[in-house]
Image (spheres, rainbow, N blue to C red):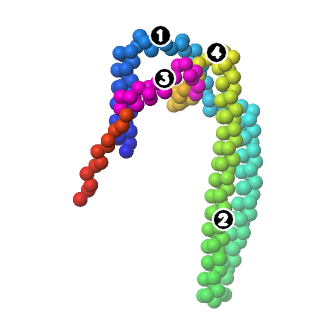
Amino acid sequence: MLAVSRHIGLIGLIALTLIAASNGRVSAQAMPKPIIAVIDFQRVARESAAGKNVRIQVDKQHAAFQIEIKAMQAGLEKARKDLTDQQTVLAPEALNQKRKEYQTRAEEMQRTVQVRKRQLDQIFVDGMRQIELALVEVLKELANERKINMIINAARGQGVVLFADNDIVITEEARSRLDKRLPSLTLIPPEKKK
């Protein structure tokens, strides 16, 4: 599947290059002059007052969860010590029952740790999502005020367009032309393995 996606992507890139080369004069005349801004989106989100506040809240919640888990660990350690001390005095059935109870408590603690970790992750993600949504609105305002028609994310490894004025986006026109040129496609299924 990945190979098919790469192949299709390569064909698309080649097609776009050919189209740009053959129609460069028409496209350049119809396009407005780009006014580009650059932002490190993640840095702004992370270093903003709200970003710092999210981190503080997550750290506080983490500390509260740590207290809960340490109490569970202490109880589990006491149960293990009691089990070790009682090995010589308990009947085999009673000892097996105590081992099962200990194992159940250990598994419960592991589940609790996993649940708390997911909760912390979700809290962080939800907070950062709110910040990102607000930042997008700020970027739209900045773009409007400064007449910017494209904002590029300069975060390491990103290089993603975060905003582009509709006048310089050709997505719909390209889709329309592709629909006319290639209205349908029949895929040839791979041969069934014997």
The residue range painted magenta reads: 162-182
Q: Nearer the viewer, mark 2 or mark 4?
A: 4
Q: Name the disc covering residue 29, or none.
A: 1
Residue extending furthest toward the left: 194
Q: Residue at x 71, y 51 (%)?
A: 62
Mark 3 or mark 4, earlier in chain? 4
What residue does disc 4 label? 147
Sequence-earlier tag: 1 or 3: 1
Q: Tag 4 or tag 2, which sits nearer the N-term?
A: 2
Amino acid at pointer 3 = Ile
Residue 75 lies, with reference to residue 131, above or below; the image says below
Do the residues bearing badges 1 and 3 touch, measured as CB atoms within 8 Å? no
**Element under label 3?**
loop
- Distance CA(mark 1)–CA(mark 3): 14 Å
Question: Which residue is denoted by mark 3 in the rendering?
Answer: 170
Residue 109, label in figure: 2
Q: Residues within 10 Å of mark 3 (few under 14, many from 20)?
A: few
Per the model, the C-alpha gap separating discs 2 and 4 is 56 Å
